[in-house]
Image (tube, helix red, strand yellow):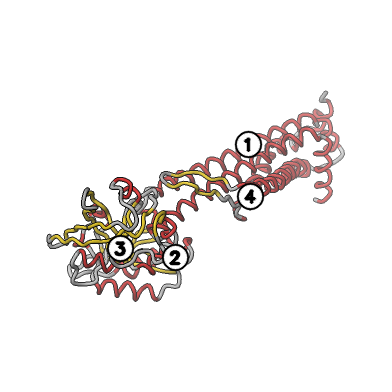
Amino acid sequence: MLKLLKIAARNLLRYRRRTLLTTLLITLGVVAMLLFVSTSGSFKQMMVGQITDSMLGHLQIHKKGYVSSIDSLPLNLNMKPRMLEKVEEVFAERDEIEAWSPRVKLGAMFSNFAQTTSVRLNGVDPEREKATCPELPKRVIEGNADNLVERGKILIPELIAKGLSVKTGDAVVLVATNKDGSVNGINFVVQGVLEGVSGPGGRDGYLHIDDARALLRMDENEVSEIAVRLKSPETLDALLKDLQGTLGELRNQQGKPAFEMHGWDKLSPFANIAKMIDLMTLFIKIMLVSIVLISVMNVMIMAVYERIREIGTIAAMGTQPGSILQLFVIEGLLLGILGAAIGVLLSVIVVLVLQQVQITFDFGRQSGLVLYPVIAFKDVVFASLMVIFGAVLASLQPAWKASRMDPIEALRHV
């Protein structure tokens, strides 16, 4: 085998121009795939992080039926204190959970005493909400976000602040209807203005959870949803399956499921964009395999055609067809390894340059987002193995043809 390896390497060096061009094509394929995977993966992770870390959390728990009616923020589908206690018991046994935050969601009328508009609000516990959505304070573009939101104060979305000309420190009034139909109004002070983000929740305001309960005149400490942050987002599917087997099995007095659990991807339309990114990545990988197959097959077919007399000579000298086949397969293997190695090296260099340049872009209402591409080790291994496998696969047909040549006919070839 070592002798065949040396002969294959020498044959590639004999035809340097052809070897160089083939290696270049393979290298370009590897670079194209790794750069696309790293940049698209960075974009996907960044946007998922923006959504989960500033609004949704990695998963949410609601009373059964709440999500299907979430647009109307139904107060009659809030979770009672006993349900909240059961959730807390289950969470205490799950090491995957880093933090969780109870919320009271409601719709209200927002007035600056001159103009009125509708607003969606989240009543939150400030410390728990910051632990669950650590990027939320960064969305405060005006005002103080050290304590997120204080009692008697409110964070309003940028859209309402501009539309009603409301600024930090202004007095406003919120009027809401509770589940019994009674109306209540409370005065608040604007603590800050929130930058809008894409997706559900991007135009919501925030107030203290106790203020939300007071506004709705709740007799009990009900919650509309529980947002959960995981130590590692990769454990989301496993935790959801686990929770389905615990909370999902609990029944209410009517014998129906009491809870429903949803990952962020079921609550945000960006999940469809993430799927499109994954689909485009798959197409890029298919294109890479095609480039490798065509490039290597072309060079190996030419190699067989140009070396027919040489093949006939070594066959006449007693070289077995299997050894001839191995010789050409090894040449394809070496081309794949060489192209993969150079491609990975160039990709790492380009990614390091992009990290230093720090490309920024706007996404929806968000501006100044920094793209920080990273090449994962698994992507390097996958791309390298794909290229090498494609090179070997492409060399099989020409190698088979070479090994089946009649030595006499091959020696007669001009």
- Residue 324, relative to residue 190: is it above or below? above
In the shown orientation, is residue 181 left or right of residue 252? left
Q: Which residue is mark 3?
A: 153
Q: Secondary structure at mark 2?
A: strand
Q: Position of residue 86 (x, y in %)?
A: 30, 74
Which amino acid, by three-letter code, is at mark 3? Lys
Q: Which residue is mark 1?
A: 291
Q: Quadrant of residue 8?
A: top right
Q: Secondary structure at mark 3?
A: strand
Q: Earlier in the sequence, mark 1 or mark 3?
A: 3
- Residue 250, relative to residue 412: is it above or below? below
Q: Secondary structure at mark 4?
A: helix
Q: Earlier in the sequence, mark 4 or mark 3?
A: 3
Quarter in which the C terminus is drawn: top right
Q: Which residue is mark 4?
A: 356
In the shown orientation, is residue 131 left or right of residue 220? right
Q: Position of residue 331 (x, y in %)?
A: 76, 42
Q: CA distance from mark 4 to mark 1?
A: 30 Å
Query: Which mark is in front, 1 or 2?
Result: 2
**Label 2–label 3 contact, CB within 8 A:** no
Task: Please name the residue shown 84% across and 29% down the image.
Answer: 411
Question: Of the numbered discs in the image, which one, if any, rests on residue 230?
Answer: 2
Query: Which mark is in front, 2 or 3?
Result: 3
Q: Earlier in the sequence, mark 4 or mark 1?
A: 1
Task: Please name the residue shown 48% across and 61% down the image.
Answer: 234
